[in-house]
Amino acid sequence: MKIFTSNIIRSIDTATCDKEGIPSIALMERAASVAADEIISRFPTSQRFVVIAGPGDNGGDALAIARILLDNGYKKVEVFLFNVNEKLSRDCDEERKKLITIDGVDFTEVRREFSPPYIGPKDVVIDGLFGSGLSKSLKGGFVSVARLINESGAFVISIDVPSGLYGEFNDNVNPRDIVHANLTLTFEIPRLAFFFAENADVIGEWKLLNIDLDKKTKKDLPSDYILVEARTIRAHLLPRRPFTGKRDYGSALLFAGSTGMMGAAVMCAGAVLRSGAGLVTVHSANSGINILQTSVPEAMFEPDRNEHFISDMKVHHPHQVVAVGPGIGTNDMTVNALESLLKTAKCPLLLDADALNCLAKRPALLDLLPPKTVITPHIGEFDRMFGEQRNSEERLRKAIEMARYYNIIIVLKGHYTATVRPTGRVYFNSTGNPGMATAGAGDVLTGVIASFMAQGYCPEHAATIGVYVHGLAGDLASARLGEYGMIASDISANVGRAIRMVIDCESIPSKLQL
């Protein structure tokens, strides 16, 4: 699913109206109808609503929703339309005219003074003050309205986006000046702002509502931001052919583990095999041989000459991918071994965990990264490599810059893991849950991505597929064990089932409610 900017979404709205031969207010009515249906499904007719509408089309949406609620038997609907400049959009004005024809409607048009209504914890506020077309931060009285809503304790439903939030980047906006929604109802296309951690408390739960925007227009318009869904992954997964052997599905070499951290190597190797690779060899500290071969007997073990850590990363046999990092530590000899590998690598590389900490320890190694290397940093690892970032928006911009500069794929791990390609395109993941914030989950992800690289998928596709499958496996583990009870090995155990679900078009559980 493409994620478009607010300006492009408006052009899609216009194209939809043109192709259907309908006025813009008809599309507004369509949007208001599905939003009202969602609200009606959640609240009884006895619920009190306070509708806050602005002078633009977002306000028109809110007015139309208020009218539909009244038409459906909701008696406690109080509407405030802010028209301080006495300039409503055409469609907002039309919706105002429709609303005021209803007998007994509790409607106030605010032109000068505003006497705030009582809003309490048992009430529902419908926020239609300003949408994603906002061109500047809320000021003056509008900030006071936002804070009135936020301090009321009411359940807040924002239409399109919470008022005061831009649809894309908000790094210079004070969160106190934005309406804090419990539920954000947006139409068909998610906003980029939804994928940044700093906005989570402002947006609350968000849900996409279908309003039948023109499919061809959406397909033809380019976007640098993509939300990855099951159909995206299904289109790239290759079938397992009957007349094949293990070598047809590739060989992965892992440089992983050290004394005290062999579990990372175990989890990574297991995930490689669970994801379909034919062969996996683990090169690790000599002391790890019994642990590895007992825990993952399907994997081959290649002992390092050093007893406690990896001191040599020579590749002695052909492999389709070399993955480095889980549990290797940052001993100087290990860093030297990584430098030698980067200088001589002849197959795709995947670097994670301590391999990234080695790069941070010796930044000049970044210049040695072969083209299309995949790196999988969490926030701390990313900032150690590329400098401290103030927030997730700034971090994503930096990742785009670094992916282009070094010609690498950056898997920036988080709630919506972002896979950033050298072209600048960003793929946000839609699977996963907070239960995956557990030791070893990153090692499993490394194994899953490495497995797809071993099977011959290009690094860009392997990273995107691996992140989705890993997240879906985590969702399956959570469904069985709960977010508190799952551990990394539970994720690995569900990888095969996750792949099968995608291939067989089984119903995929989605926290996004797409």
Image (tube, grey):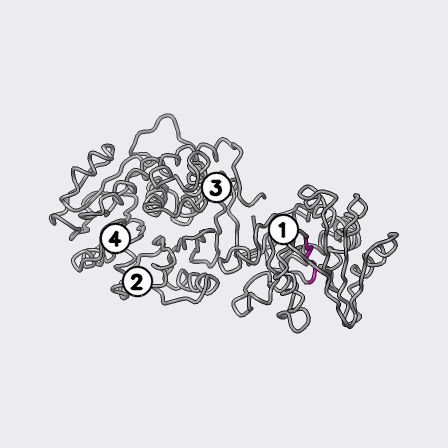
Q: Which residue is mark 1?
A: 218
Tell me the amino acid under the disc marked 4.
Ala
Q: Which mark is residue 233?
A: 3
Q: Which mark is residue 366?
A: 2
Spatial CA span between label 2 and label 4:
14 Å
Q: Earlier in the sequence, mark 3 or mark 1?
A: 1
Magenta stretch? 124-129
Q: In the rendering, which numbered label is found on residue 345?
A: 4
Mark earlier in primary sequence (2, 4): 4
x, y percent for residue 512:
55, 45
User: If you read the primary sequence from the N terminus, does the residue marked by circle 3 or circle 2 appear first?
Assistant: 3
Residue 349 appears at what percent x and percent y? 30, 51
Quadrant in which the C terminus is drawn: top right
Badge 2 density bin: few <14, some 14–19, many ≥20, Cα 10 Å: some
- Give the Cα separation between the discs numbered 2 and 1: 38 Å
Circles 3 and 4: CB atoms closer than 8 Å: no
Query: In terms of depth relative to the viewer, which is nearer, 437 or 311?
Result: 437
What residue do we see at 35% from left, 59% from top? 380
N-term-proximal mark, 4 vs 1: 1
